[in-house]
Image (tube, rainbow, N blue to C red):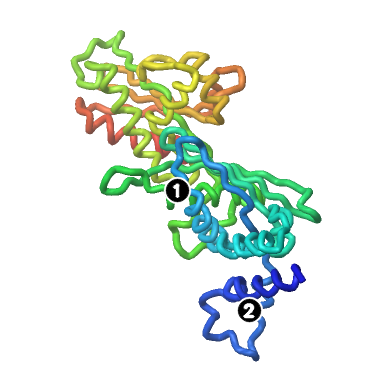
């Protein structure tokens, strides 16, 4: 009796999930090809969403919509929304049966049930997904997705929605082992690829050999912040890295009570250890040296090692002769894009 009643409810809730919107007008009794094709896709249900303490509870509901968008963009999965899941759970309760994730997943015929943990660190969103699959959901595969919280509304409150979708997409690339899962989407805003976080460490100034009155050498504290912020903004449009802004970097330092980091001096081992432990593997630092003909900017891409050291991956240098912050900006942008090419 329980199984029959739940099966009837599922038929009512999921009929529209079986037919893509573009095919509704074509879904008649003589055209069942689309239905058979779509129902062959693995069905996914979210079992639980756990939020970090600093995150608003309404993000649980937003995760439902974000997962539907992320899975729909891949066109490889069917998604059971919270409304259908909760209706089945409610029916279990009405019949005095326990609506566990396992029971509901089995009844709803989900090939995978997902447990999601979402945390925020500064302006960085991290989504951890554990997918339980196989008979009795005993097999497990996990994925992590990172994305930057770039959007604010008119009251300067964070708009989480697009970032949750992006982070889930990256987690799904990890779970499926397919870095091109979203390479062929029609809407370029959903063309997401796996990406590594990239942190900006310091910008040092060297005018010992050539004493200079150039503006860039006059205020190390202000100009180093400006230079690193400029590099962050320049990397923000790249799809294969997740640039970490200075506020987020300093939030990581604050976890270990590291405060007042100077952006124009070499990073300490303690700082590098904190960054490595949080999962930041790649970093950029810079050096500006005064020369007789102007100045030379060197940017170095490094890997942060488990020994709290920097292992150089690539380094590039470019000279410029324009004594202005605009001259530095043009050179820095070109050099960064070449470095990350």
Pointer 1 local density, CA inside 10 Å: few below 14, some 14–19, many at least 20: many
Residue 110 percent across, percent down from the top left: 70, 61
Q: Residue at x 39, y 14 (%)?
A: 265
Quarter of the image holding residue 286? top left
Query: Extreme top residue here?
Result: 208
Residue that badge 1 annotates: 163
Q: Is residue 111 left or right of residue 59?
A: right
Which of the 4 quarters of the picture holds residue 260? top left
Query: In this figure, which residue is indicated by the disc labeled 2?
Result: 34
> In which quadrant of the rendered image does the N terminus lie?
bottom right
Return the x and y of residue 336 as percentages of the image width and height: 40, 35
Left-right relation of 45 to 280: right
Q: Position of residue 137 (x, y in %)?
A: 76, 52
Give the numbered dot on residue 5.
Answer: none
Q: Residue furthest bottom?
A: 30
Front one among 295 and 283: 283
- Image vertical order of residue 154 relative to residue 307, above or below: below
The residue most toward the right is 135
Is residue 291 shown to the viewer in this render?
no
The residue nearer to you, when weighing 161 against 331, is 161
Q: Where 246 sits versus 6, above or below? A: above
Residue visible at 75% across and 68% down? 2
Q: How many marks?
A: 2
On the rendered structure, is 332 left or right of 212? right
Q: Is residue 318 above or below residue 74?
A: above
Instruction: Report if residue 204 is visible in the image.
Output: yes
Q: Quadrant of residue 157?
A: top left
Q: Residues within 10 Å of mark 2 (few under 14, many from 20)?
A: some
Give me the residue at 66% from left, 83% from top.
32
Does dot 2 land on a helix, a strand or a loop? Answer: helix
Looking at the image, is mark 1 or mark 2 earlier in the sequence?
A: 2
Locate residue 290, reporting x and y percent.
29, 17
């Amino acid at each position: 009796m329980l199984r029959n009643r739940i099966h009837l409810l599922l038929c009512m809730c999921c009929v529209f999930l079986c037919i893509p919107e573009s095919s509704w007008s074509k879904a008649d009794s003589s055209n069942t090809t689309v239905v058979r094709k779509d129902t062959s896709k693995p069905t996914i249900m979210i079992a639980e969403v756990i939020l970090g303490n600093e995150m608003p509870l309404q993000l649980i509901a937003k995760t439902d919509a974000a997962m539907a968008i992320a899975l729909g963009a891949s066109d490889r999965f069917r998604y059971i929304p919270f409304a259908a899941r909760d209706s089945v759970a409610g029916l279990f309760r009405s019949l005095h049966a326990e609506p566990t994730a396992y029971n509901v997943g089995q009844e709803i015929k989900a090939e995978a049930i997902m447990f999601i943990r979402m945390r925020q660190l500064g302006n960085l969103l991290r989504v951890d997904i554990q997918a339980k699959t196989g008979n009795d959901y005993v097999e497990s595969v996990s994925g992590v997705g990172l994305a930057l919280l770039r959007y604010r509304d008119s009251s300067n409150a964070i708009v989480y929605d697009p970032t949750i979708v992006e982070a889930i997409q990256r987690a799904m690339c990890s779970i499926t082992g397919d870095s091109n899962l979203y390479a062929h989407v029609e809407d370029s805003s959903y063309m997401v690829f796996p990406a590594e976080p990239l942190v900006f460490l310091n910008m040092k100034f060297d005018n010992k050999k050539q004493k200079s009155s150039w503006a860039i050498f006059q205020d190390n504290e202000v100009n180093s912040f400006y230079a690193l912020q400029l590099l962050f903004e320049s990397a923000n449009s790249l799809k294969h890295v997740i640039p970490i802004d200075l506020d987020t970097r300093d939030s990581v330092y604050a976890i270990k009570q590291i405060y007042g980091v100077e952006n124009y001096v070499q990073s300490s081992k303690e700082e590098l250890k904190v960054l490595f432990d949080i999962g930041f593997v790649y970093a950029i630092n810079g050096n500006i040296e005064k020369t007789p003909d102007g100045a030379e900017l060197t940017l170095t891409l490094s890997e942060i090692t488990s020994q709290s050291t920097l292992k150089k991956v690539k380094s590039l240098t470019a000279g410029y002769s324009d004594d202005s912050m605009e001259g530095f900006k043009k050179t820095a942008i070109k050099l960064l894009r070449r470095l990350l090419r």
